[in-house]
Amino acid sequence: MKYLILIFGNPRSRAIWEQFSDEQRSAGYAAYGALDESLRASGELIVSEALTDPAMAQRLPARVDLGPTDGPFAEAKEQLAGFFLVQCDSMQRAVEIAGRIPESEFGLVEVRPVMDLGDVDLQ
Amino acid sequence: MTEINLLLRDLAPQVLGALLRTAGDFEASEDAVQEALLAAALQWPVDGVPLHPKAWLITVADRRRIEIWRGDAARRRREAINSALPAGEPDPRSGIDDTLTLLMLCCHPSLTPLSQVALTLRAVGGLTTAEIASAFLVPESTIGQRISRAKQRIRASGARFRLPPATEFDERIAAVRQVLYLIFTEGSTASSGTALQRVELTDEAIRLTRQLQSLVPDDGEVAGLLALMVLTDARRPARTQADGALVPLALQDRGRWDAAAIAEGTALISATLATAVVGPFQLQAAIAALHDEASTAADTDWAQIHALYLLLERLTPGPMVTLNRIVAQSMVLGPQSALEELNGLSDSLSGHHRVHAVRAHLFELSGEAAAARSEYQRAARLTRSIPEQRYLESQASRLA
């Protein structure tokens, strides 16, 4: 089963990151590097990417008016900062992987099951 | 699949077994066999199939293994190995035992289920890493890393290329059955567009289970598993519409079911139930046979299916079995008692889409269209299967 592990950022987490010393920041990068490496080795990693700052995002203008929205998304406090797409045996395992992401300490990591073509009742 | 491909897949575990008996190095031997299979897949269609295809593969693989070994020699510092090549066609009997040994090695308890599946498909099934990756819709590197990691784990566990002791045999063969079942269910999905290649996993699971059943004909659960696969796969042509939409069992065109497969599966499960100690795969196969034997949905022998589910529930209690038993019960006793029992179910099932789908169905049978519709909608939101979501959404809008 595939799971998407989403890593969010918010103004507070960005402030913490910016106040870090160079050593602390490289420890953070190393944690990511180690996680990437171990998922690659176990064959569970499909892809992982970091996203640019939300300021770089471009939103498509509405062509049908659905009424008031919470957007524009770029103004929301919690912003998607990066993701891991993994294939593993269970949600439990996906959560275990997600727990190794430094941001999980601050409650900024979420795991979402990916839809697929399977799991149809066979009977 | 071409005849050459099929031949190569049949020979793959035998060739690997032959290498392992002389050399014992699983990692290098398995890589070498993959390369020999690739070489054959390229050369044989052009030059023709050699007189002794198995000996050809063993010779090429063994040569390659020695090259791999020489490359690693400095690091590993092993004793000199016997590099003599087998002259003729080896004893076919040993090839058969090798397949069973190899299956048990690939389903080694030190591996995760996903790794067991990938390694079994490659080392026993003879599939390439690229074929496995496309069947599971993941990049080739993901599968490649999973396989090499699995082989390292087997080496680290100290496992040898021999059958496990009698005390472990049952447990190990249960793991093999589980892996084959996983391969089958992974492939047993709607055969639409992007899913086309996954059908091959179903065929592959049946082929390997057939091999296993011929090796352990007295294992009732292996026979039950094979019957379950064959009887389920028999309905494949009717399970999806041309556009890929899912057709539920009750609405399938039974004329499109594979009659020969149904006859085979039914004969197998009947013979097995008469002689073997009953087990969960046999019960599920018996249930599948009852569905397959009904010429219309209305003819289905729900009373017997209900009785079999009660037995299955006692043997392997679990929320999904209970849910299926409740569905069967509703067909025998009507929707009301089933709805009541569904409401009393433990929390272990709340939030599972299938509970809502069943409740929707039961509401519909009791004539409560609005309640049925909202349960179908909830089920559609909770499923993680695209074809199933599409089906549940259409059920909901049908009741609008």
Image (tube, coloured by chain):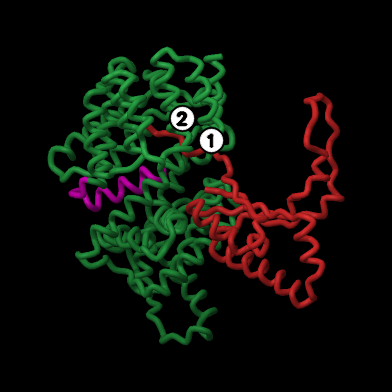
Q: Quadrant of the C terminus of chain B?
A: top right
User: The disc labelled 1 sits on which kind of residue?
Assistant: Leu
Can the viewer see residue B238 in this picture? no
Give me the residue at 52% from left, 59% from top: B39
Colour of chain A, in one word, is red
**Residue B280, quarter of the rendered image:** top left
Chain B's colour is green
- Segment tinted magenta in the rendering: B203-220
Q: Are discs 2 and 1 less than 8 Å apart at CB?
A: yes
Q: Amino acid at mark 2?
A: His
Q: Which residue is tagged 1? A: B382
Against B25, residue A111 (above or below) is: above
Q: Residues within 10 Å of mark 1 (few under 14, many from 20)?
A: some
Q: Is tag 2's residue or tag 1's residue first in the polypeptide sequence?
A: 2
**Magenta stretch secondary structure, dominant:** helix
Residue A97, quarter of the rendered image: bottom right
- Provide residue A106's location: percent of width, then percent of height: 67, 60
Residue B259 in the image: above or below residue B42: above
Q: Secondary structure at mark 2?
A: helix
Residue B209 colored magenta? yes
Extreme residue toward the top, this view: B367
Provide the residue designation for mark 2. B356
Query: The residue marked by circle 1 belongs to what chain?
Result: B
Residue plotted at (24% across, 34% down): B310
In the picture, measured across the screen, residue A100 lies left or right of residue B322, that is: right
Q: Are marks 2 and 1 on the same chain?
A: yes
